[in-house]
Image: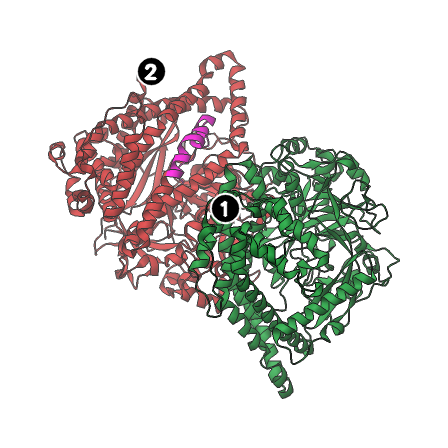
Chain colours: A red, B green
């Protein structure tokens, strides 16, 4: 398959173009760029320089990669990847020890041979795609119940993926759902398994402000790092080997070392994860009243436990660092979303458009008959979910909080899933994924800390025992030996070697195990499977309903219609601009090094390294200083439409050059996942000038600047 | 004395005038107005319309009054006073009960006969003043030790006051210290003892945002109320009587019902309390490292105790409301000041000017001999204070936290002080003040709540017993009966009638009392007196040293020199302008009603009354809406130089009309007391349009608008 296809016209883009200087809602599939009127908005290159459907013509899209759940961009012909510090975080953490603390001190490879392997990392580059909606939906029949429907779609997607991978050896295929129950697109990716760490600033730069500043503006974080993609000498994908050579991307981004200025047009390319722009008010209410409050509460408690354990011991702190960071990130985002959802106008606006839609449906009796109950049926599904949520979230919370139970359950699940035909398995246990899954499970065990595990396990076990079970729940009976203290200090599921082996166990081996965690996982497994099927059943119902919702919405005149984010390649555009977070307040779009110094207290997370302070105090900003005021820009704000997964996305100027790296949104913009707003939806990036100054001027990694073609 | 005098030229004002649009540091004595170049800065009336030295010519100063520790202004010819809600707070609180909750519901007199007396309130209007520095300092001799020096100055000030009051029957005289140990001015005040509450909005307007928003911007508080001054029918000062008539001020302020706009020149007249602009680095360090951290900690703890007691019972909540408000206000201001003092540049800038001064002193051997050790001697006094602070602050903290101990100690003190000749007494026990002191002590008892008293008393007693006593401290031995529980439920010092009588006790009666609080107070009294003398001794030393410091500073060329605030009448000017609180942030100078609605959550302190919401939602802003955008302005920000005591000061426009009422400063500006900064020192006022809208449009007090000559 050597042709890049556009996406089916089922995705109708009705954009109200105008002379406005604002960004617009929309994470656009790159095949749609020609229709966006980008030249009028300020783009100075042709849209086909961003994306060209002729694969023989390299374009900016070839310089974009997915780095696990993040985005990165190639910034040299030798596979140098520019991404966020927080995207490389697990890699930095796993390479660190108290004696070699790269989180604390930063990391700088002195030559390529010193670049550190990052197990668990995978890089993907989008090669091509095609609409497979008809091929997917052809397997759905009216006779199917909802579980069957979900499973049939799922199986069909996997078949298509398998076929595509067979046709294109050495690639990864993914059938992405663009509109639930409606539109599916098969994406083909180049994928790279040997990823190495090249440069990371100290956390006191890369995570400056920590959880205090996370999701906040003004921001002063140098959240960037450099990794490098390696392949076998013949260019094929390979796991780490000293013989591997740097990957040569078809295209890499040129650095805009002069940065951008207020009002400038910018765009981002990246892999935004999930949005819910087409979901209903019932969904928003479920999130607001049921799910998000539990997430906030649950994460706050876990963070508290992990932080207490970390306070006394740096070794434990390093173990828990990535986990705390991830929990805190979700907690604060969820809090922002809750706050946003409690602003009446967001839910109310969605409700208003649903009332309009319902009136439109009922205005015609044929429409009424076909679509009249869609919205109320959707609401009924969320109603059922809300009723069972306390119980279901407690069980899944227990599994996620306890490394022991979580690991054991994955081992049990793997043993049973692997008995099935490849395409029938849960995706992570398919032959092509099982290796990465095992790697991630084993790496999770590396963070094991007995006392923390005990506290988390006991509390969640207690909550599970106390929670009211729905009538449909299977009884879960387990041996009280799991509460034995010795368990947490010395368990096979806490041991990397043993877990590696156990991930290959058969159902018989699992059944014969006397390990209390495995026995507990066995006791829970039937109920776990019941809930997994229940999820599929709900997904099937919602999938069919949302498919019908899309159908009828498309008949509604004048409706803007862009697919939700789904971790596939998207483009979003906007301008460098500030915003008003509230009455009498204005936030400007650039922060400066002066702000770093204002925040620096010497205490974590505001403990700027001496080297940075000294270089900054000496005013050594050189050509990286802003032309306007001579200050060094640090972070910047722009009105693009982003979500998680856009972490590490390049911020590209009108000429197609890299002017910064995206890493966060403002607190008000956490609600982006539900609704985008031109007034306050702003994303946050590191200004390229700060990244270059830290890398080149402060830490003197001149080889990297040279490799990127930056003269100082 | 029928002539208003200017203040002696000892107060040299070296002002650097320019075309700057900013305010300037300085709370100027009104006799200095002619020298300030106000016309160039934007004042459209002649300075002599603000202050006229010819008493036969009424001027704006005649419309300004002191309301206890606050400022107010006359806004009608019938003694109507416009001041802050928080200035009238104690009066509103004391008039309230759970059945008649004026704090919660607001208060509106339906005709003058319904206006509510506010015992404990006193209104003063400045009549005239004259420099009495020579007369005061003539009593100081080189032979005096420092206690003698303080006492001699103190006695001389009281003699001059007594003489002035004898010469001008019906007035109050006060000798104010303009520059410690150097300049003294005798002020003569008309004073009024019958003060009544006319109108107060509900606390949910007048204290909107409560402690959360206190010292913060953006602000949305309707912190205003109306009181009225009454005198005997013959115009003389009288306590409450139904025959009293409204006071007729010589001048009242005209209302600028159209408000002001960004960039406008404004000025304030008022009674700023205390600043420390001429104190040394040693003082700042004492505040930063010793006193303020204890104040913050101590107040936070007391607030916690009072809030816990208030949570369960609205009656207790009303009792504790004013006390919590006052503690919280001090706590947050102190926190702001601590933060400001930790900004290195503030202390560093003062240190730099001290280094310059020291160099200037040492550049001349005669100067060196006379002034060479002044700064180090000042530092030595603060050093001694720092050493004893833990002990002394614990004792004074106990006395202030325990109403029982505090009241008992005042009773004991009163008994002994009243044995002395009038001029020898502590000021509050002098014949002219004893009545107000007794009133305030009795009103304090009205807030008594046994369980709260017990908690505060026990904790502080424990701290006092545990604290390390300095070698010089007298032993304090007291009967453990004070820890008897019964005490807190039923003590004579908790009873208004009994306290009224006890305030007239002789030393013998005090000595014979068996009340445990009185006996404890007797046990503590000798140590209390020792510390009072120690304070006087330190004051004497600092007083003499600061006098010498002023002498030498005046010889330093090009130094700006404005006296510290000391609760006497001052004028300060500036512009309506925003500020940047930090990198990438800008705060605009007006908030609007939209911001009130954004903050309104229905939960205290953001529980806007339905009546306000309904009127606002209906958009009934009429002529009070801003001409720019049709929104209703609520609060405003300006670059004047204010401190505590400026609460209630009128914000006056270039034409001399009332455009708002001052009630707070920004968090950054809490540091004003130590140093003023054009970049971030901003004061906060209620826009007159919001006050008029709440009073007239929302609560329909049209009689008040009519009385003020406001047409809608």
Is residue B630 depicted above or below B430 in this figure? above
Residue B468 is situated, as x and y percent measured from the top left of the image, at 43, 64
Query: Which contiguous range is marked in magenta?
Result: A272-297
Residue A358 is situated, as x and y percent measured from the top left of the image, at 51, 19
Q: Chain of mark 1?
A: B
Q: Quarter of the image containing the N terminus of chain B?
A: bottom right
Q: Report if residue A203 lies within the magenta region.
A: no
B664 vs A332, nearest the viewer: B664
How busy is the neighbourhood of tag 1: few (under 14 within 10 Å), some, or many (20 plus)?
many
Question: Regarding mark 2 in the picture, which secondary structure is present there?
Answer: loop
Q: Report if residue A276 lies within the magenta region.
A: yes
Residue A21 seen in this snapshot: no
A276 vs B75, nearest the viewer: B75
Residue B37 is situated, as x and y percent measured from the top left of the image, at 78, 64
Q: Quadrant of residue A299?
A: top left
Majority SS type along the magenta span: helix
């Amino acid at each position: 398959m050597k042709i890049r296809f556009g996406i089916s016209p089922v995705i109708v883009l009705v954009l109200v173009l105008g002379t406005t200087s604002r960004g617009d809602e929309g994470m656009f599939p790159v095949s749609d760029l020609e229709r966006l009127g980008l030249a009028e908005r300020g783009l100075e290159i042709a849209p086909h320089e961003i994306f060209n459907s002729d694969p023989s013509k390299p374009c900016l899209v070839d310089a974009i990669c997915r780095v696990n759940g993040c985005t990165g961009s190639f910034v040299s012909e030798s596979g140098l990847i520019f991404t966020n510090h927080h995207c490389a975080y697990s890699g930095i953490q796993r390479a660190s020890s108290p004696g070699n603390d790269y989180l604390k001190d930063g990391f700088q490879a002195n030559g390529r041979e010193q670049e550190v392997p990052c197990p668990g990392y995978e890089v993907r580059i989008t090669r091509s795609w095609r609409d497979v909606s008809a091929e997917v939906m052809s397997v759905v029949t009216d006779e199917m119940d909802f579980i069957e429907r979900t499973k049939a779609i799922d199986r069909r997607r996997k078949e298509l993926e398998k076929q595509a991978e067979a046709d294109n050896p050495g690639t990864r295929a993914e059938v992405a759902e663009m509109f639930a129950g409606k539109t599916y697109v098969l994406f083909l990716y180049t994928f790279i398994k040997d990823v190495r760490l090249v440069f990371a600033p100290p956390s006191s730069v890369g995570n400056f402000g920590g959880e205090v500043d996370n999701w906040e503006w003004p921001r002063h974080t140098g959240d960037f790092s450099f990794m490098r993609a390696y392949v076998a000498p013949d260019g094929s994908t390979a796991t780490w080997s000293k013989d591997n050579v740097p990957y040569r991307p078809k295209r890499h981004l040129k650095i805009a070392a002069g940065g951008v200025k207020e009002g400038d047009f910018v765009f981002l390319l990246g892999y935004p994860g999930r949005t819910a722009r087409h979901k209903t008010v019932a969904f928003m209410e479920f999130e607001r009243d049921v799910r998000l409050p539990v997430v906030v509460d649950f994460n706050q408690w876990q963070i508290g436990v992990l932080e207490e354990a970390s306070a006394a011991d740096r070794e434990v702190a390093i173990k828990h660092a990535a986990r705390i960071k991830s929990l805190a990130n979700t907690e604060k985002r969820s809090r922002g979303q809750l706050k946003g959802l409690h602003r009446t106008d967001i839910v109310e606006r969605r409700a208003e458009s649903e009332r309009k839609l319902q009136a439109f449906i009922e205005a015609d009796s044929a429409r009424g008959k076909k679509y009249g109950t869609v919205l109320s049926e959707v609401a009924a599904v969320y109603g059922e979910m809300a009723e069972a949520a306390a119980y279901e979230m407690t069980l899944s919370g227990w599994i996620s909080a306890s490394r022991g139970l979580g690991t054991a359950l994955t081992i049990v699940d793997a043993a049973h899933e692997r008995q099935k035909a490849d395409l029938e398995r849960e995706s992570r246990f398919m032959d092509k994924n099982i290796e990465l899954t095992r790697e991630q499970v084993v790496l999770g065990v590396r963070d094991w800390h007995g006392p923390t595990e005990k506290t988390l396990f006991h509390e969640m076990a207690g909550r599970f025992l106390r929670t009211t079970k729905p009538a449909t729940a299977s009884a879960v009976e387990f041996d009280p030996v799991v509460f034995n203290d010795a368990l947490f200090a010395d368990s096979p599921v806490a041991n990397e070697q043993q877990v590696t082996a156990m991930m290959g166990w058969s159902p018989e081996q699992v059944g014969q195990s006397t390990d209390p965690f495995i026995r507990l996982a066995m006791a829970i497994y039937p109920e776990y499977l019941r809930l997994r099927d229940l999820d599929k059943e709900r997904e099937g119902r919602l999938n069919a309903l949302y498919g019908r919702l899309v159908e009828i919405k498309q008949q509604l005149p004048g409706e803007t219609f862009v697919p939700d984010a789904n971790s596939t390649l998207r483009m979003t555009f906007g301008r460098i601009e500030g915003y008003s977070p509230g009455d009498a307040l204005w936030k400007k779009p650039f922060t400066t090094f002066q702000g770093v110094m204002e925040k620096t207290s010497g205490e974590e997370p505001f403990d700027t390294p001496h080297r940075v302070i000294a270089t900054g105090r000496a005013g050594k900003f050189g050509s990286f200083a802003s032309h306007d005021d001579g200050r060094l820009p640090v972070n910047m704000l722009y009105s693009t439409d982003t979500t998680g997964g856009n972490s590490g996305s390049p911020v590209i100027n009108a000429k197609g050059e890299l002017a910064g790296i995206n890493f966060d949104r403002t607190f008000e913009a956490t609600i982006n996942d539900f609704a985008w707003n031109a007034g306050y939806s702003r994303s946050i990036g590191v200004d390229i000038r700060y990244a270059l100054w830290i890398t080149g001027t402060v830490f003197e990694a001149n080889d990297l600047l040279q490799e990127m073609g930056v003269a100082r």
